[in-house]
Image: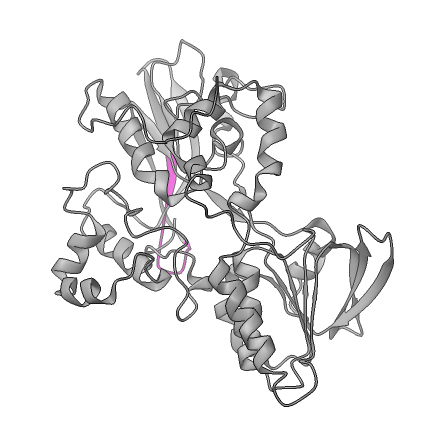
Amino acid sequence: QRPAFHWHPGLLLDGASLQVPFLADLVTLADPTSPWSFLNYLRTRDRLFPFYFAERFHIQRAEYDAYCRWVTEQLPGLHFGHQVDAVRWNTDRALFEVDFTQLDRDGEAEALGRAYTRHIALGIGTEPFVPEPLKPLAEAEAVPVLHSADYLRHRERLLTADHITVIGSGQSGAEIFLDLLRARPEGAEKIHWLARTQAFAPMEYSKLGLEHFTPDYSRYFHALPESARDELVPRQWQLHKGIDADTIAAIHDELYRRTLHGGWPDATLTPGVHVRTAGRLANTRVELHLEHTQQGTRTRLTTDAVILATGYRERPLDALLGGLDPYLHRDASHRPRIDDQYRLVLDPTVTGHVYVQNAERHTHGVGAPDLGLAAWRSATILNNLTGANPYPLPERTAFTTFGL
């Protein structure tokens, strides 16, 4: 429904890089010969030799954003500015019907429409998550309490705040803390960085650890009992919610540099803390009521701005697929069942398929939102959709054998 493609625009900080290699583009891991590869993008821009000499396996986020936009601008089947309102199964036609609203550049309704289709692929992904105690403040305008997804849009305003608090221990929280730290005067940084996790921990990036982001692990995870899957996901947070080791090193280097002439920077980094409640003080400040998990102690923190690097949650499918609810099979937690071909499990009377991308973490594990598996998922869907094998995929992708 957006007017054009943009990939996490609020977090395209200068120098910030992807946490996966450039081979995790839209196509390469399924079809290295595709004209839509990142390398071909560089070739069309006469930038292959500079990239070759740069020797960068992990490209900058801004470059990945530009690459994706280059692809979208050349695909005639893409229609931006279209908001999907409802999806239903039309039994008479044996087709899905999709109601949509065409939007103008300002996002206002311009026209209504309906499309019919044999199959659907959903790629609505995730949305910023704001913890319940902070929702009222995030929705108000007076005090800047905002999600990290909007950081760059509000950066200049945030830098004018006397005291800033960053909440969240993942990569986004680390990058924003580092960016703020570098922009604040020495000795008067006035930044708090808080996190629920017990440490500002590095992401699991060992070679064998990364095999959790292979099709082999996705298949293993999908075959586990639902209860085992639900127990595993929260325990694997360090596979995808930790901080890149180079970012941790850069933060420590910057903090250390500020001690060279004596004294300590006015920056407080506290893990193991969660926000119980929050409120406004005199309409211009925020008061956070904190609790330390291990100590069992509580305190209050007054701040002028809060940045919520609290991650993303899958967008609920119920509103969009309400018309399919009578046909949709659900698990014990009322979540949609998704088979090993990335299809929603529907009643057999529905002859079409609804495929999903990045809505299947509860059935496929931590690799669901990972860019490295995007091409594999797409190829799997296309192979199933066509009933042929346009993208031959390898049987084995990991050295680890995950089950007996």
* Left or right of 381 on screen, residue 187: right
Q: Residue furthest right?
A: 297
Work out whether residue 177 or residue 86 is closer to the camera in this orientation and state it.
177
Instruction: Kindly give the residue lying farthest to the top in the view shown.
Output: 348
Q: Position of residue 335 (x, y in %)?
A: 56, 26
Judged left or right of residue 337, residue 121 is left
Examine the image and state in which quarter residue 290 appears.
bottom right
Image location of residue 172, percent across then percent down: 53, 59
| Picture mark count | 0
379 vs 205: above or below: above
Q: State which quadrant residue 91 falls in.
A: top left
The percent position of residue 281, horizontal first and vertical second, equals 80, 71
Say which residue appears at 34% left-offset and 50% top-offset.
81
Is 153 contained in the magenta span?
Answer: no
The residue furthest bottom is: 261
Residue 134 left/right relative to 368:
right
Q: How is the image coloured?
A: one colour
Q: Observer-nearest residue: 189 or 115?
A: 189
Is 120 displayed left or right of 361 in the figure?
Answer: left
Seen at 51% across and 17% down, the residue is: 329
User: In this rendering, is residue 117 above or below 185?
Assistant: above
Question: Viewer-proximal residue, 280 or 104?
Answer: 280
Q: Position of residue 166 (x, y in %)?
A: 64, 65
**In the image, what residue occupies the spot 22% across and 52% down?**
38
Q: Which residues are magenta?
A: 99-108
Q: Give 128 or 377, whichever is nearer the viewer.
A: 377
> Relative to 14, does residue 259 appear above or below in the rendering?
below
Q: Can the viewer see residue 19 in this picture?
A: yes
Q: Is residue 175 visible?
A: no
